[in-house]
Amino acid sequence: MQFVSDNWAALLFAITTITVMFFFFGIIMSRITTRRILMQNMFYDRRHEWLLRDQEKHRPEQEELAAALKDKKGKLLKLPNVSFHYIDEERVRDFYSDYFREPTVESMVRELVTETSGEIKGTLPQILESKVGGSNLNKWISTIKLPETSLNGMFLKYQQETLKNNQVILDLELLDVELSDVDNFQKLIEKLKEELEFDIKKDAVEKHINRLKERAADRTMSKLESARGWAIIMGSFNITQEDEFYCYRYEHPVNQYLVTTENPVTIEATIPVNSIQPHVAGNYKQSIGSAIPATIYGEVWQPISRDRKLFTLKITPLAIY
């Protein structure tokens, strides 16, 4: 009887042990399977992201925008001179001086030290301070006189360097849209009509296409809302006179995709009438109410805001030509 009891206890122990082992094995396999699924999902998600990025790079609208930006930058970098309509002379001279003074001083010191010793020992600030007896370096640099150049030359060089260093926005007046949804919907409507002779009411189609166009325009609108810093705007500006100011107004091409905004999206700049350069002053008086081609190098004063119903991006000009 004791023997049977012992065997029964051993059997129960073995069954319990095996059950526990299967239980833990199941937990381990479940975790392995879960981790494998998570890894697969991560892989598919990343692959999907890569595919989307690749599609983004190669969609026609993005390629068209990239080509327009390249063309604009190339034209600006190759300008031999400019004929100013307006220029803030004092700020241009200050910006030019601040932007180029220290690199010019650094070049001068390198040449000086190389000529005298054949090599540069120590940092440039140490060398500069040794040359001026340890006096305030910034004060000494501020007294360095840059080579004489014309206002035209100063502005062109400043503009070129800020362009090369990507310190100025170039695409505010350009259109950046995603039209794949619009194209796909139009193709679907055509297919339904051709293959199934299913004709949808024109009003319903146009209403949905307009919604898709507004969604497509969101890229450009977001860009105009987040605009900050310096920008170069090239386009056809409508000239109006408001009291003692000329107003430049550029109608943004994104308006062709918007149907619900109360006012058109514009880029605007104002300058005093008496600040127009004399050689074009007469032309401006004759061009009020007309559109003229112009380029504005300026700073974003006020971006647009859909929430606040502000659809005018305002620029404070440094130069107009």
Image (cartoon, rainbow, N blue to C red):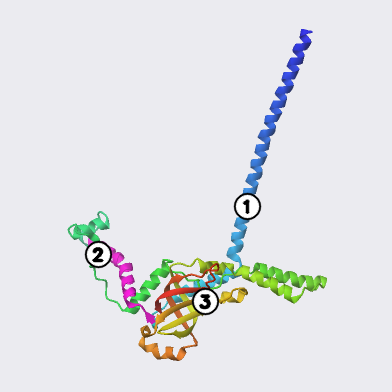
As measured in the structure, the alpha-carbon distance from the residue carrying label 3 to the one carrying label 1 is 39 Å
Disc 1 packing (10 Å; few <14; some 14–19; many ≥20): few
SS assignment at label 2:
helix
| Span shown in magenta | 86-114
Numbered disc total: 3
Which labelled disc corresponds to residue 259?
Answer: none
Mark 2 or mark 3, which is nearer to you? 3
What residue would you read off at disc 2? Answer: 141
Which residue is rendered at x = 40% and y = 80% of the image? 271
In the picture provided, is 20 more to the left or to the right than 223? right
Residue type, mark 3 in image: Thr
Q: Which image quarter: residue 86?
A: bottom left
Residue 58, located in which quarter of the rendered image?
bottom right
The x and y percentages for residue 210 are 66, 72
Q: Main secondary structure of the magenta part?
A: helix
- Is residue 81 visible in this depiction of the protein? no
Marks 2 and 3 in Cβ contact (< 8 Å): no
